[in-house]
């Protein structure tokens, strides 16, 4: 989920949990914010893939245990360089 526009404490974790979803959030008040919602167990949740001096909540990643796949959710409005850096990191992870 992208641009959730809420802080972690205000995210509706209980609502998703009631539907058997696991929620991981990197929120931010008023703007930005990303989340990963999954029916499967997620591991290695990361919010530090990009070092952002402005401390904007723009990227979250996780690993799906049963398939050993990485999932990334990012919001990069007007942030081409974040997409480029993320792509480079994904290529490194895959190799």
Image (spheres, helix red, strand yellow):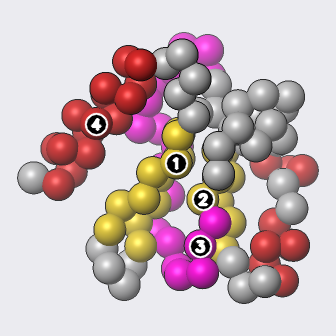
Residue on which disc 4 sits: 87
Element assignment for label 1: strand
Q: Give me the residue at 79% from left, 73% from top.
A: 16
Q: CA distance from mark 2 to mark 1?
A: 7 Å
Q: For residue 33, what is the image quadrant?
A: top right
Give the side of residue 90 with respect to residue 70, left or right.
Answer: left
Measuring from the top left, give residue 93's x and y in whole percent.
Answer: 21, 51
Label 4 vs 1, first from the N-terminus: 1
Q: CA distance from mark 3 to mark 1?
A: 12 Å
Q: CA distance from mark 4 to mark 3?
A: 22 Å
Q: For residue 88, what is the image quadrant?
A: top left
Sort mark 4 into few (<14), some (14-19) or many (20+) by Cα contacts within 10 Å.
Answer: few
Disc sitting over residue 10 in the figure = none
Q: Give me the residue at 17% from left, 54% from top.
A: 94
Q: Is residue 78 above or below residue 10?
A: above
Q: CA distance from mark 4 to mark 1?
A: 12 Å
* Contact flag, marks 2 and 3 (Cβ < 8 Å): yes
Q: Is residue 87 above or below residue 1?
A: above
Residue on which disc 3 sits: 38
* Contact flag, marks 2 and 4 (Cβ < 8 Å): no
Q: For residue 83, what is the image quadrant?
A: top left
Is residue 47 in the magenta section? yes
Identify the magenta region.
37-55
Q: Give me the residue at 59% from left, 73% from top.
A: 38
Element assignment for label 3: strand
Sort mark 1 into few (<14), some (14-19) or many (20+) by Cα contacts within 10 Å.
Answer: some
* Contact flag, marks 2 and 1 (Cβ < 8 Å): yes
Label 2 vs 4, first from the N-terminus: 2
Measuring from the top left, give residue 39's x and y in whole percent.
Answer: 60, 81
Disc sitting over residue 36 in the figure = 2
Q: Is residue 64 visible?
A: yes
Residue on which disc 1 sits: 73
């Amino acid at each position: 989920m992208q641009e959730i526009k809420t802080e972690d404490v205000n995210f509706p974790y209980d609502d998703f949990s009631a539907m058997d979803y696991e929620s991981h959030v990197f929120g931010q008040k008023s703007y930005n914010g990303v989340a990963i919602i999954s029916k499967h167990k997620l591991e290695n949740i990361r919010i530090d893939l990009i070092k952002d001096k402005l401390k904007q909540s723009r990227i979250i990643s996780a690993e799906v245990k049963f398939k050993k796949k990485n999932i990334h959710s990012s919001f990069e409005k007007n942030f081409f360089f974040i997409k480029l850096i993320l792509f480079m990191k994904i290529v490194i992870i895959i190799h």
